[in-house]
Image (cartoon, grey):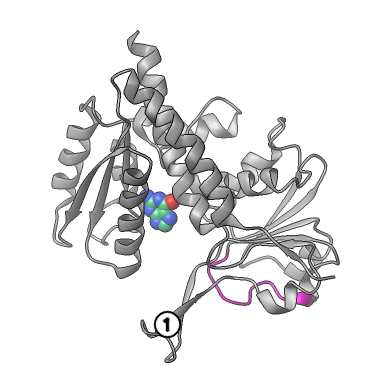
Amino acid sequence: MTAAIIDGKQVAADMRSELKEKVARLKARGVTPGLAVILVGDDPASRSYVTAKEKACADIGMHSADNRLGAETSEAELLALIDAYNADPAIHGILVQLPLPDHIDEDKVLLAVDPDKDVDGFHPVNVGRMVVGQDAFLPCTPHGVVQLLLRSGVELSGAEVVIVGRSNIVGKPLANMLIQKSDTGNATVTVCHTRTKNIAEHTRRADIVVAAAGRPNTVTAEMVKDGAVVIDVGVNRVEDASKKKGYRLVGDVDFEGVSKKARLITPVPGGVGPMTITMLLYNTVLSAEIAICTES
Ligand code: GUN
């Protein structure tokens, strides 16, 4: 079997045009959805993510407030900035790009963001709401994975899903979303990690494999069954002298091998990546819509 490609760019473009219409409707009611983006330090990958987020806001008519702070910024300064945005009615979402420099306590920063503006879905209040199935801002990358699956017509109800990776940003929240008793869940989920005894034994029985381990070639052809759906969340830079930047991006999946066995597969780049930013826009627009409802 040769896998069909799940085109994340196309799905993201479709969702962004839906969101653009929502933004226009909100603006007609006097509200422009606003996102505050905060980057501390100058990690090159983080810098390029943040630039892409700001551009995406502008593309659909949203307002973004850009804050690029030096690596020496103190925790107190960062917390004060977050407090100011918590109180700012023009801002509906606050995004603090992770990872933060070592001298800043990440947990403290995530707790400082008002849960009603936590469009990353990282505040423990939103995590808790998600786990018990209440309305919550869902974290962007796993929510993007769910949307990609649904919009590609993949049946989730009763599906065997194996996730490789247990991060707070992807693996743990995705597992929670997929086991919810809802139309976007009802799957049977296994989460594999660095202490799992035989990862291939799990992935081989999966209808859907999600690779989110942060390591190239984590999922290879002999680890997936014929006809599986394979979602690659990995974004790894590998040296490549033939590229202008000196590197190329690869996922966690051996794309060439696995695409000969899978039914559907996401490429890297152009798969999950464009969905993460789209779901950030989605959450910010949702937050602005909720703000209008609670005002009137
Ligand atoms: N770093 C890597 N992924 C993310 C994300 O989804 N949100 C934030 N804020 N930082 C990240």
Quadrant housing residue 7: bottom right
**218 in the magenta segment:** yes
In this rendered view, identify the residue nearer to me: 296 or 27. 27
Count the marks: how many?
1
Residues 37 and 285: in front is: 285
Q: Is residue 46 left or right of residue 18?
A: left
Looking at the image, is 84 positioned above or below residue 144?
A: above
Magenta-highlighted residues: 213-221
Disc 1 is placed on an element classified as strand
**Residue visible at 61% across and 28% down in the picture:** 133
**Residue, x 60% and y 60% (percent of image)?**
165
Q: How crowded is mark 1: few (under 14 residues within 10 Å), some or many (20 or more)?
A: some
Asked if residue 52 lies left or right of residue 252, the reply is left
Residue at the far top: name it.
296
Give the residue displayed 53% in from the left and 49% down from the top: 12
- Where's residue 61, x and y in %? 33, 38
Question: Given the image, on which type of amino acid does mark 1 rest?
Answer: Tyr
Q: From where the camera sits, is residue 198 visible?
A: no
Tell me, yes or no, if residue 3 can be seen here: yes
Q: Quadrant of the N terminus?
A: bottom right
The residue that disc 1 covers is 247
> Residue 193, position in %: x, y?
63, 63
Query: In what quadrant of the picture does the C terminus appear?
Result: top left
In the image, residue 139 sits, relative to residue 29, either above or below, namely below
